[in-house]
C-alpha cells in the first residue's frame, strides 16, 4: 500500500511552476522553501493558503491538476510535521468539493475528460484518507473502512461502465492495473487487520491477478498499516502470503453463512500452504534487474508462514525447521522484523518440544 500512496502523492505534487500565474508561483516557491529547506510550519502554511486564495481570485480552476496538487501538498506538509488531523481535514475538504462537482457537473456533456480526472483523484484521496484513519495516530477504523469501500466501489463501477459502454469521446485513460490492485490491497489489508480474513482473501487474490508476473510486488504487498494476523509481522505482508493467511483463517461468521458448514480447517491450511509455496516459487523465478528487496523479504515471510502452518497442525519439528530457515534468510538480507518475529515464536515452540 505504501508504494501506491507514494504514487498518489508524487502524481499530484507541485513541480512545474510554469503552470501557475507568476503571483501564485511566487507564493508556492515560498511555501516550498519553508516546508523543505528552512522548515517553518507557520510560514509554510501561510504561503500555501495565500497561493490558494490568489488562485481563487484569479479564476483558476479549483479542480485542475495544479490547484488540487497544491491542496494535496499542503496535506502532505501537515503529515510531515506530524499534524495528522490537519492533513485529514484538508483532504476531507478536497474530497467533499470533488464529490459535489461530480454530482452536479460530472454528467454534463463536455465534462467527460474532467470527470475522469476528478473521479480518479477523489478515489486516490479516499484511499489516502483510509490510510490516515487506520493509523494509530487517528485510529478511526469505521471511517477508514467507509473511505476504502467507497474508493474500491467507485473504481470498479467506473471500470465496469467503460467495459460495458465503451470509452466515450473525451474520456481520459482510466486507472492502471497497478493502481486498481493497490486500491484492492488497501481494503484487503484493512479487513485483515480487523481479522475479517473471509473478506480480505478475495481482495488479495484480485490484487495479485492485476500484478505483472515478473514484478516483486506480485510476491509482496507492502502495507504501512496492515498487520499479518497470523504472523504478527507488521508492515511487510506478502500478496500470496496475505492470501495464504486469510485462507487459513477465512471462516465467515455463522450469520453470514447460516446454511453452510464451517470450512474444514485442514482444507484451509492446505490451501494456505499452497499459496505460501507459490509465493516462494514466484520469488525464485524473478531475476535481476526486476528482482529487488521485496522478493528477498517475501521469501523470508513465506518461509515463516510455512512454519506457522506447520505449528497449527501440531508438526513442531517442521515448524521449527521453517522458522530457523526463515530466520536465516532474514538475517542474510538484514530483515530485522523477520528475525524478531522468529525469535519470539521460537520461544513458544521450544516449550512444546
Image: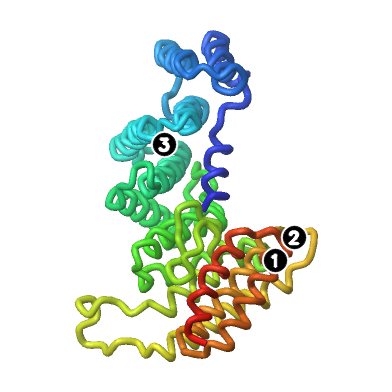
For numbered disc 3, what is the local secondary structure? Answer: loop
Q: Is residue 64 visible?
A: no
Q: Is residue 346 above or below residue 186?
A: below
Q: Please state the horizontal and vertical placement of residue 251, each as a whole percent of the image.
A: 33, 80
User: Which one is earlier in the sequence, the residue at label 1 or at label 3?
Assistant: 3
- Dot label at residue 246: none
- Residues 123 and 104: in front is 123
Q: CA distance from mark 1 to mark 3?
A: 38 Å
Q: CA distance from mark 1 to mark 2?
A: 7 Å
Q: Please give the name of the residue rendered at 75% of the width and 60% of the height, measured from the top-left corner.
A: 290
Does the CB distance between marks 1 and 2 fall below 8 Å?
yes
Q: Is residue 221 above or below residue 30?
A: below
User: Which one is earlier in the sequence, the residue at label 2 or at label 3?
Assistant: 3
Task: From the viewer's perspective, tell me whether residue 86 is left or right of residue 242.
Answer: left
Q: Please give the name of the residue rendered at 34% of the width and 55% of the height, measured from the top-left corner.
A: 149
Quarter location, residue 230:
bottom left
Q: CA distance from mark 2 to mark 3?
A: 40 Å
For numbered disc 2, what is the local secondary structure? Answer: loop
Q: Is residue 81 visible?
A: yes
- Residues 233 and 279: in front is 233
Residue highlighted by disc 1: 214
Quarter location, residue 132:
top left
Front position among marks 1 and 3: 1
Q: Please state the horizontal and vertical placement of residue 37, each as a whole percent of the image.
A: 62, 20
Residue highlighted by disc 3: 111
User: Which one is earlier in the sequence, the residue at label 1 or at label 2?
Assistant: 1
Residue highlighted by disc 2: 290
Amino acid at each position: 500500500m505504501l508504494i501506491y500512496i507514494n504514487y498518489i502523492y508524487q502524481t499530484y505534487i507541485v513541480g512545474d511552476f510554469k503552470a501557475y500565474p507568476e503571483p501564485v508561483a511566487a507564493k508556492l516557491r515560498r511555501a516550498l522553501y519553508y516546508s523543505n529547506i528552512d522548515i517553518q510550519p507557520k510560514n509554510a502554511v501561510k504561503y500555501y493558503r495565500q497561493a490558494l486564495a490568489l488562485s481563487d481570485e484569479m479564476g483558476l480552476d479549483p479542480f485542475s491538476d495544479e490547484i488540487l496538487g497544491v491542496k494535496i501538498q499542503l496535506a502532505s506538509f501537515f503529515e510531515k510535521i506530524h499534524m495528522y488531523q490537519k492533513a485529514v481535514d484538508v483532504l476531507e475538504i478536497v474530497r467533499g468539493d470533488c464529490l459535489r462537482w461530480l454530482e452536479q457537473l460530472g454528467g454534463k456533456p463536455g465534462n467527460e475528460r474532467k470527470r475522469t480526472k476528478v473521479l480518479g483523484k477523489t478515489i486516490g484521496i479516499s484511499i489516502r484518507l483510509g490510510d490516515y484513519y487506520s493509523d494509530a495516530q487517528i485510529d478511526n477504523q469505521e471511517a477508514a473502512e467507509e473511505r476504502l469501500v467507497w474508493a474500491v466501489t467507485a473504481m470498479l463501477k467506473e471500470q465496469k461502465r467503460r467495459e460495458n459502454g465503451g470509452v466515450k469521446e473525451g474520456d481520459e485513460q482510466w486507472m492502471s492495473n497497478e493502481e486498481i490492485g493497490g486500491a484492492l490491497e488497501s481494503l484487503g489489508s484493512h479487513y485483515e487487520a480487523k481479522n475479517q480474513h473471509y473478506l480480505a482473501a478475495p481482495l488479495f487474490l484480485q490484487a495479485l491477478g492485476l500484478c505483472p508476473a515478473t514484478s516483486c510486488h506480485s510476491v509482496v504487498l507492502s502495507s504501512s498499516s496492515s498487520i499479518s494476523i497470523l504472523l504478527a509481522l507488521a508492515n511487510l505482508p506478502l500478496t500470496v502470503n496475505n492470501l495464504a493467511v486469510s485462507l487459513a483463517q477465512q471462516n465467515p461468521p455463522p450469520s453470514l453463512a447460516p446454511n453452510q458448514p464451517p470450512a474444514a480447517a485442514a482444507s484451509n491450511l492446505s490451501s494456505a500452504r499452497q499459496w505460501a509455496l507459490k509465493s516462494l516459487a514466484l520469488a525464485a523465478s524473478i531475476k535481476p534487474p526486476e528482482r529487488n528487496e521485496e522478493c528477498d523479504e517475501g521469501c523470508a515471510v513465506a518461509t515463516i508462514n510455512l512454519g506457522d502452518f506447520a505449528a497449527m497442525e501440531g508438526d513442531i519439528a517442521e515448524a521449527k525447521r521453517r522458522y530457523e530457515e526463515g530466520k536465516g534468510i532474514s538475517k542474510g538480507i538484514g530483515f530485522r522484523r523477520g528475525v524478531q518475529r522468529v525469535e519470539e515464536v521460537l520461544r513458544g515452540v521450544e516449550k512444546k518440544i
